[in-house]
């Protein structure tokens, strides 16, 4: 494997290929900063370009756009509470409070460095464990995916900083919103109040509304603070201290491991990996009350997870020909346009392509780190602009990003409506993040549960008789018991404090 990886490095280090790798990651980062646009739009627009490039160069270009957008998505999340990509929603929870407390430079550095380390772990997993992880992924059927989604939904109820009952209610709300549109099995329209909702509610519209527009409304309802201190952008404030760095080692390791695992599973992706990493980090933390206030481990873990997942997401795409998400489906389409069929034979028949793409991840992550760190002080300078003057630009960016996703005016109107809903939720201490994860995971749970019932004749015991599904079932029970025990312990501590 290492010899093959060195072969891939020799391919990607050719000057013409290296230029495409650099251009891909740079374009991906710039697109990731723009809220609502995302890698899928950029790859769709650049797909015709692959006709004029060789297969290796086009794959390296498109892959660079994909994982480069993960880096860029954290910038707008930290500075403006605008998640550039769905996986960067979790970054808002800790990154934006850090920016509000004059530590935006530190947050950007930790996000960049955690993303770099997570990406490198993902590359290592690709090189050393691509084939074993492919074998594991093939053993996941509908029952296993259903139980995996249930664990994700339980973890979503642990994301919020307040009551877990409120978080669970928000998860249910997200699932309900995810049911809007045509039923995937029967084609029956559910909760479709207007024809424009036949395809369901846009994830981009929901995320931009709950996080972006609601934040604009919240700031607009406040009076500006006179005589605010000027922002500090010295490198001393950007680099974490030794004590801070020590607290980030294990969160980054846990986030990278979680991201590597979920990325290799078809149909999961970086968004689920980042939510799971945040929820698990909160459970492992000795100071869970600090989450949501700008806690550095809560920022590092999901950033490492989403970039590790971006790398290992190519395992099922290249070795099985099974796309993990819409972006991977486009990349498979680009391969087919170049006359290459992805699958188990790709590693043998096209070693230059396979290992060249993997080696480009290694080179691309180094390029992204070298680009990001010097630009941190420049990004922080954006916060010197009074927020009141940023309102029109932020709303314009949101509307353009949402409209470009599906070219739908209805999506823009829904974004504004979700913005009002998000403002009301925050006013009454309801967390918006669990809504988004419920929205993503709800349809996945429905599809896999239905498929399980159809395949096994409605036998519910299948979830505990299949080995992997049984292990995941036990994990979900442990999560429920853990949540109940934590809630009771917290109530006892509160009762002792008040007595």
Image: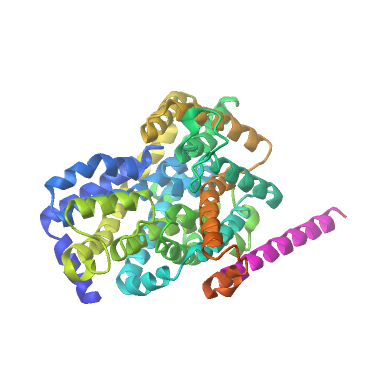
Q: Nearer the viewer, residue 297 or 460?
A: 460
- For the residue pair 48 and 200, the one nearer the viewer reads as 200
Residue name at image x 56 percent, y 63 percent: 147
Q: Quadrant of residue 306?
A: bottom left
- Main SS, magenta residues: helix
> Relative to residue 345, is residue 175 depicted above or below?
above
Residue lying at 38% horizontally and 34% vertically, measured from the top left: 406
Could you say where residue 353 lies in the image, as x and y percent from the top left? 19, 62
Quadrant for residue 347, please give it. Answer: bottom left
- Farthest residue toward the right? 499
What's the magenta region? 472-498
Pick the front one: 101 or 143: 143
Q: Report how many numbered discs are placed on residues in the image.
A: 0
Specify the quadrant that holds the N terminus.
bottom left
Q: Name the residue: 37% across, 49% down.
A: 326
**Residue nearer the viewer, 56 or 177:** 177
């Amino acid at each position: 494997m290492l010899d093959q990886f060195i072969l891939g490095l020799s391919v990607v280090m050719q000057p013409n290929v290296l230029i495409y790798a650099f251009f891909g990651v740079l374009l991906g980062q710039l697109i990731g900063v723009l809220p609502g646009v995302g890698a899928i739009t950029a790859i769709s627009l650049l797909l015709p370009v692959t006709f004029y490039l060789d297969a290796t160069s086009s794959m390296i270009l498109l892959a660079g756009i994909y994982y480069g957008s993960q880096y860029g998505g954290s910038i707008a999340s930290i500075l403006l509470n605008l998640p550039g990509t769905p996986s960067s929603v979790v970054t808002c929870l800790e990154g934006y409070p850090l920016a509000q407390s004059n530590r935006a430079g530190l947050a950007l550095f930790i996000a960049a460095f955690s993303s770099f380390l997570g990406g490198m772990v993902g590359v290592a997993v690709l090189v050393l464990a691509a084939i074993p992880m492919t074998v594991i992924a093939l053993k996941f059927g509908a029952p296993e995916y259903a139980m995996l989604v249930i664990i994700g939904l339980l973890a979503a109820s642990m994301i919020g900083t307040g009551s877990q009952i409120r978080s669970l209610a928000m998860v249910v709300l997200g699932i309900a919103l995810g049911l809007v549109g045509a039923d995937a099995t029967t084609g029956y329209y559910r909760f479709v109040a207007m024809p424009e909702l036949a395809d369901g509610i846009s994830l981009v519209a929901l995320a931009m509304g709950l996080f972006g527009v609601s934040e604009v409304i919240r700031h607009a309802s406040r009076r500006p603070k006179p005589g605010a201190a000027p922002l500090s952008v010295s490198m001393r404030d950007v680099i974490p201290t030794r004590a801070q760095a020590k607290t980030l080692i294990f969160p980054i390791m846990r986030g990278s491991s979680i991201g590597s695992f979920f990325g290799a599973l078809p149909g999961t992706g970086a968004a689920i990996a980042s939510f799971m990493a945040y929820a698990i980090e909160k459970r492992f933390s000795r100071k869970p009350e600090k989450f949501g206030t700008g806690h550095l481990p809560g920022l590092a873990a999901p950033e490492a997870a989403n970039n590790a997942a971006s790398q290992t997401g190519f395992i099922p795409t290249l070795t099985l020909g099974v796309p993990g998400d819409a972006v991977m489906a486009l990349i498979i389409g680009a391969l087919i346009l170049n006359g290459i069929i992805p699958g188990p034979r790709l590693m043998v028949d096209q070693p230059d392509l396979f290992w060249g793409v993997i080696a480009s991840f290694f080179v691309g992550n180094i390029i992204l780190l070298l680009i990001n760190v010097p630009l941190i002080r420049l990004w922080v300078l954006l916060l010197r602009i009074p927020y009141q003057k940023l309102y029109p630009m932020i709303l314009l960016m949101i509307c353009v990003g949402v409209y470009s996703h599906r070219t739908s005016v209805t999506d823009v109107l829904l974004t504004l409506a979700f913005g009002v809903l998000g403002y009301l939720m925050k006013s009454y201490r309801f967390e918006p993040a669990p809504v988004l994860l419920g929205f993503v995971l709800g349809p996945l749970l429905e599809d896999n549960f239905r498929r399980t019932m159809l395949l096994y004749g409605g036998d519910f015991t299948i979830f505990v008789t299949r080995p992997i599904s049984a292990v995941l079932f036990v994990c979900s029970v442990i999560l429920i018991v853990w949540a109940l025990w934590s809630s009771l312990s917290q109530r006892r501590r509160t009762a002792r404090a008040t007595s």
